[in-house]
Image (cartoon, rainbow, N blue to C red):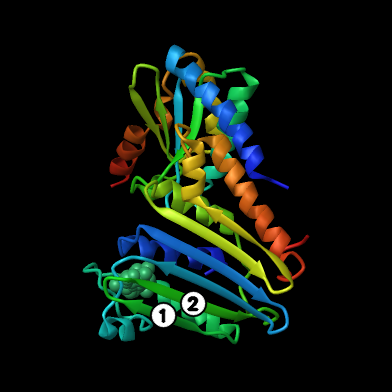
Amino acid sequence: MKSIIELEEIRKKTFERIGMRKNKTGTRVLVGMATCGIAAGARPVMDAFVKELKKRSISDATVAMMGCIGACRLEPIVEIIDPHGSRVTYVKMTPEKAARVVAEHIVNGRVCLDYTMGEAERAEKAEG
Amino acid sequence: MRDLSLHLMDILQNSIAAKASKISVFIYTDTVQDELRIVVEDNGMGMEPEQLDLVADPFATSRSSREVGLGIPLFKASAERASGCLTIESMKGKGTIVTATFKISHIDRLPLGNVAETMVHVILSNPQLEVELTLHDSRDGSFHFSSAYINEMLGEVSISDYEIITWIRDYIDEGIKSNFGGVLNEIDY
Ligand SMILES: Nc1ncnc2c1ncn2[C@@H]1O[C@H](COP(=O)(O)OP(=O)(O)O)[C@@H](O)[C@H]1O
Ligand SMILES: [Mg+2]
């Protein structure tokens, strides 16, 4: 059975990780979840980020969820905030895209332009 | 609507739109009466009696958009299709209580769906909101979850952190299983 004692253990570990982030300032991954986010699969995307980060032993990054930002047709949305505070918004994310964002953006610092909000909006305009 | 957790989401969103700061969700099952009961209680702005008379009607909505409010009428239809009913009690300035009942064994009763996901979603989208969930089956024990309690315990650690959210989701899932496993046929032990 899950218990509050177990949550206390998780809290301690998370607290230590946050302390580490304050020193080294790691990347933050925010996965958006709109009302339609459940159907749009925000959860597998979040799980994929955690798995990929673990696989690459990136321990100073944090993954969290955020509420609706009002762009439901582009869900699931992921925001990557780098240690200097600059943000990139990725849209229509999948677990496969998450793996590429970890490898290229978080590890190598190269933004995956084709997944960004700006690119999606440009494509929509082009379609008319 | 596919399942009851999606209806619940809609009802919770109404409470949030009504500026509630605290929402309590109760889910009860009574195997003797063959009844499932879902209650959502909020301390939001409430409704005037005239407005209350209109809300079960699909053409009533106080929003000025073109869309027609359907959340409550659809939930009501789902309850009635399973030999149940929906009632709303509301007092202007005090709050609202929405209660829906279902005959558990009715062939048209919708499955419970992913209640944990609905709760997690509401908590994440409204960090200041106090959300409670109580589960109870007539045979025995009950389950209680309070976001305010968790927040207080977490201190500096955010409730939106992956590990915390995962724990909350699993915790609620276990509560659902231990209370309703074998009672609602879609939930196994
Ligand atoms: N918990 C509540 N507190 C106050 N007013 C409510 C509440 N729930 C519903 N209402 C009122 O009933 C109306 C109809 O709700 P609903 O059927 O869900 O449609 P919608 O949310 O799309 O307007 C709402 O617009 C609101 O005015
Ligand atoms: Mg509604």
Amino acid at dot 2: Thr
Residue for badge 2? B99
Q: Is residue B75 above or below residue A113?
A: below
Asked whether mark 1 and ligand 1 are closer than 8 Å, the reply comes as: yes
Q: Which chain contains the residue that carries disc 2?
A: B
Q: Quadrant of residue B140?
A: bottom right
Relative to residue B72, is residue B29 drawn left or right? right
List the residue tagged with mark 1: B88
Q: Quadrant of residue B189?
A: bottom right
The quarter of the displayed image where residue B5 is located: bottom right
The percent position of residue B8, horizontal first and vertical second, equals: 49, 66
Is residue A39 or residue B33 the one in the foreground? B33
A121 or A64, which lies in front? A64
Q: Is residue B181 above or below residue B79?
A: above
- Tags 2 and 1 in contact by the CB under 8 Å rule? yes
For marks 2 and 1 on the same chain, the one whose residue lies earlier in the sequence: 1
Disc 1 marks which amino acid?
Ile
Left or right placement of residue B62 versus residue B57 in this view = left
SS at badge 2? strand
Left or right: A1, with B130 as reference point = right
Residue A98, percent across and down? 53, 31
Q: Residues within 10 Å of mark 1 (few under 14, many from 20)?
A: some
Residue B3, given in percent of the width and then of the height, sits at 57, 67
User: Is residue B39 positioned above or below A35 on the image?
Assistant: below
Asked whether the viewer can see residue A36, the reply is: no
Look at the numbered disc 1 and give the secondary structure of its residue. Answer: strand
x, y percent for residue B82: 60, 83
Given residues B42 and B57, the one toward you in this image is B42
